[in-house]
């Protein structure tokens, strides 16, 4: 078996696997917590199952969807959305299909324009992020962004305020103004939330205007976080969700959902291009960090007061028993 990430809390979590439009009646193979998963679309919605035919171990993602059934490319066995094999073409007429002829199906949902998979028992029938979305704001999805780093390293980088002035100098920060005033982080209904943190930003969204921005960071789950940003002297709102799919211990794919109340006339490519630039800057750092797995022992790395969000995030992972490791 492949090296799977076994943390039970992650198995029971919803993971983003694709943009909605990427899941069609052409099966798509993805990796979730080290497990090969095939997703496809039927008249009844999106479906997910183990990407492995139980007959001779061929990935079902090599097959095709016919009459809402997933048909294996090798000998044409047909699986329904529950993972049961309902047709074996080579069986003589009248011979029953063995009851063992099934592959595990996984919970699959569509929400916010993404397809989500849960390998275990989902706590909620669909991801809860949608209830935190302000319907007044303009949504823009971004990704998939493959990253050669452990998922929590990517999440923590997103929650890190004091890198803005260095990694994103000239855009999200200015190294002449690196100090971070003290702030605190609270937990309410399982959501970690920081106070407002003020950062001077020379060009926070690619429009070339410097502002003092007020950041609030929130962590909803080990892999689902958001920043909420307001610029001083402006009514503009900017929310950015980051959803990370842990594919293996040291690889992941990030998706983002941006929401804003301005720039209706600015083409999506401008915002996406800007976010791509930021992500490339972050990738240089997170793909080089050692150890590759995020240390949950708070003695393992040095922390400052400005790292309170990261400290709270690491504590929360520890409390949930989530290491993202395969041991
Ligand atoms: Fe899939 Fe034989 S390997 S049908
Ligand atoms: Co960054």
Image: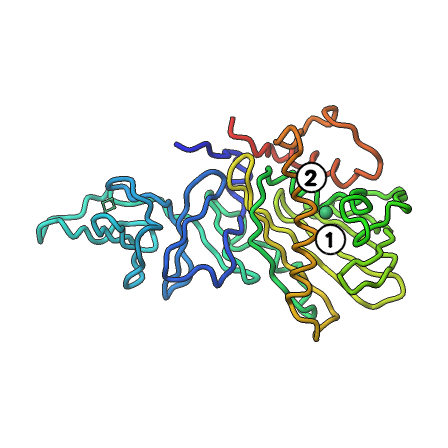
**Residue extending furthest top?**
299
> For the residue carrying disc 1, how many other residues have a C-alpha within 10 Å: few (<14), some (14-19), or many (20+)?
many
Instruction: Where is residue 327? Give x, y as percent.
Output: 51, 26
Ligand 2 closer than 8 Å to label 1 CB: no
Asked if one can make out residue 188 in the rendered structure from this viewpoint, the answer is no
Q: As rendered, which of 187 and 227 lies closer to the eye?
A: 227
Residue 135 position in % (x across, y down): 66, 68
Residue identified by numbered label 2: 285
- On the question of residue 110 being in view, the answer is yes
First of labels 2, 1 by sequence position: 1
Asked if the beta carbon under badge 2 is closer than 8 A to the nearest atom of ligand 2, the reply is yes
Q: Which residue is rendered at x = 8% and y = 50% of the image?
A: 92
**Residue 57 vertical position relative to residue 296 in the rendered view, above or below:** below
- The x, y position of residue 139, in whole percent, is 64, 66
Query: Residue at position x 60%, y 38% from top?
Result: 149
Question: Which element type, helix, strand or loop, lies under badge 1?
Answer: strand
Q: Quadrant of residue 289?
A: top right
- Which numbered tag is attached to residue 227? 1
Q: Residue furthest bottom?
A: 265
Q: Disc number at residue 280?
A: none
Would you call the spot at circle 2 few (<14 residues within 10 Å), some (14-19), or many (20 or more)? some
Left or right? Give the position of 301 relative to 114.
right
Q: CA distance from mark 2 to mark 1?
A: 20 Å
Residue 62, placed above or below residue 131: above
Q: Quadrant of residue 256?
A: bottom right
Of tags 2 and 1, the one toward the viewer is 2
Local SS, label 2: helix
In this view of the protein, which residue sits in the foreground, 89 or 280?
280
């Amino acid at each position: 078996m492949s090296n799977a990430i076994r943390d039970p809390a992650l198995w029971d979590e919803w993971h983003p696997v694709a943009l909605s439009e990427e899941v069609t009646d052409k099966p798509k193979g993805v990796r979730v917590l080290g497990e090969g998963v095939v997703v496809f679309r039927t008249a009844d919605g999106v479906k997910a199952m183990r990407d492995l035919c139980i007959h001779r171990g061929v990935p079902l993602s090599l097959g095709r969807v016919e009459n809402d059934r997933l048909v294996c490319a090798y000998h044409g066995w047909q699986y329904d959305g529950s993972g049961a094999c309902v047709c074996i073409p080579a069986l003589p007429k009248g011979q029953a299909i063995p009851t063992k002829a099934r592959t595990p199906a996984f919970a699959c949902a569509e929400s916010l324009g993404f397809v989500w998979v849960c390998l275990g028992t989902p706590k909620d029938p669909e991801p809860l992020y949608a209830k935190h979305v302000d319907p007044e704001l303009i949504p823009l999805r971004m990704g998939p962004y493959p990253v050669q780093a452990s998922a929590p390293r990517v999440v923590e980088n997103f929650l890190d305020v004091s890198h803005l002035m260095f990694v994103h100098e000239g855009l999200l920060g200015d190294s002449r103004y690196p100090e971070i005033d003290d702030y605190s982080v609270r937990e309410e209904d399982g959501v970690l939330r920081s106070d407002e943190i003020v950062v001077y930003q020379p060009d926070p969204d690619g429009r070339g205007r410097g502002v003092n921005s007020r950041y609030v960071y929130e962590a909803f789950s080990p892999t689902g976080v958001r920043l909420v940003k307001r610029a001083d002297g402006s009514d503009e709102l900017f929310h950015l969700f980051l959803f990370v799919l842990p594919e293996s211990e040291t690889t992941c794919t990030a998706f983002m959902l941006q929401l804003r109340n301005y720039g209706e006339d600015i083409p999506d490519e401008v915002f996406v291009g800007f976010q791509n630039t930021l992500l490339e800057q972050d990738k240089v750092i997170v793909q080089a960090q050692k150890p590759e797995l995020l240390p949950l022992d708070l003695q393992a790395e040095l922390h400052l007061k400005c790292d309170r969000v990261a400290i709270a995030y690491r504590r929360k992972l520890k409390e949930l028993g989530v290491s993202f490791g395969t041991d």
